[in-house]
Image (tube, rainbow, N blue to C red):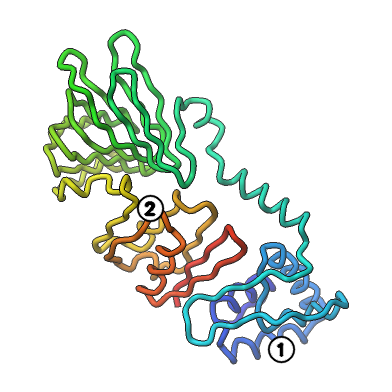
Amino acid sequence: MQPSKASDWMIALLDAPEDEALHAGFERWLAADPAHARDWEEIAHTYDVLGMATPRHRAAWAEREGTPEEAAPVATGGKIVSFPQRRRALALMAAAMAACLAVILLPDAALRLNADHISPRGQVTTLTLADGSRAQLAPESAVALDFTGGRRIVTLLAGQAFFEVTPDPAHPFRVLAGGVEAKVLGTAFEVRDARDIIGVAVREGKVSVTDAAEATVLTAGGWVRIGPEGKRAQGRMNPQEVAVWRDGRLIARDMPVAEAVAELRPYYKGVVILRGDGLARQPLTGVYSLTDPDAAFAAIAEAQGARLYRLFPWITIISGS
């Protein structure tokens, strides 16, 4: 079944720029009703503000403007499709789009209000805490601190953090995240808050992990994930791979593509969109650079036989075939 709206045609043409039958169907739809042409012009202008237009059908609205048509490349066997800006870019509207995107990427107001430290998108932040312990925050992570009255409490409000704890037997070091407490005397471990799932993994020493239901003691290489209603998953890993994001790496072993993209997203200073449920569920194995998310997205797309679209400097779409 072919699209019936201009916006759906735009996505379909982006997904299959070489599909001759699709292009023929689009041209029939465009000619069938003047309203279709007007709708296409409107959606094409919207996409043009993002620096993108469909390669073969820009003339359908460029002639109305009386502006010269500009060639745009089409994928001819490669998987990466790039849509360049038109020379007559609407600079003011593009700036407005950038401002809107900046707002989307900012931490929410509640997080800014409650956090003592927020690590910005694309940046790992290192903190030396009041007791001499060290914390590293992954991008888009936030913590609140309480080191008063002999307490050593860190509340992870978002994201993930790695802690190297200064030993102090009289004052346990506690990390709170989503109703889960990780308590240690002196060790190195990671805590992450992935929305509904809280994870703890230990690099050195021992960590006691407690929620409303039970307590678990983890040793080096041990990990636990606690989901909704206290559902637990537990296992072991190479201790040296705990929090490898600190070294700028993502190690994926049969990781769903959607999860890998989610891990990369905080390191990308823009928006990445994954299209296709089948692609999202596909297992992925490999080592990807967190310091070069563009290259990582391209490698993921190539490994999965997917298409990668780069729209303006800020938007990447990975689309299943």
Q: Residue 250 carries which label?
A: none
Circle 2 sits in a helix, a strand or a loop, which is it?
helix
Q: Residue 263 — which label? A: 2
Please name the residue shown 27% across and 48% down the image.
244
Q: Name the residue under label 1.
A: 28
The answer to whether 291 appears left or right of 133 in the picture is: right
Which type of secondary structure does the marked residue at label 1 adopt? helix
Looking at the image, which residue is at 36% across and 63% down? 257
Residue 209, quarter of picture: top left
Q: Which residue is drawn at 74% across and 83% down?
A: 30
- What crowding class fits label 1: few (fewer than 14 Cα within 10 Å), some (14-19), or many (20 or more)? few
Asked if residue 302 is positioned above or below residue 281 in the image, the reply reads below
User: Is the C terminus in the top left, top right, bottom left or bottom right quadrant?
Assistant: bottom left
Q: Nearer the viewer, residue 302 or 113?
A: 302
Q: Picture quarter containing residue 242? A: top left
Residue 133: % across, % down: 28, 25
Q: Which residue is drawn at 76% across and 56% down?
A: 93
Q: Is residue 191 visible?
A: yes
Task: Please tell me whether mark 1 or mark 2 is closer to you in this view.
Answer: 2
As displayed, is residue 171 above or below residue 224?
Answer: above
> Disc 1 and disc 2: Cα gap in Å?
42 Å
Q: Residue furthest top?
A: 149
Q: Residue 238 appears at what percent x and percent y?
A: 15, 50
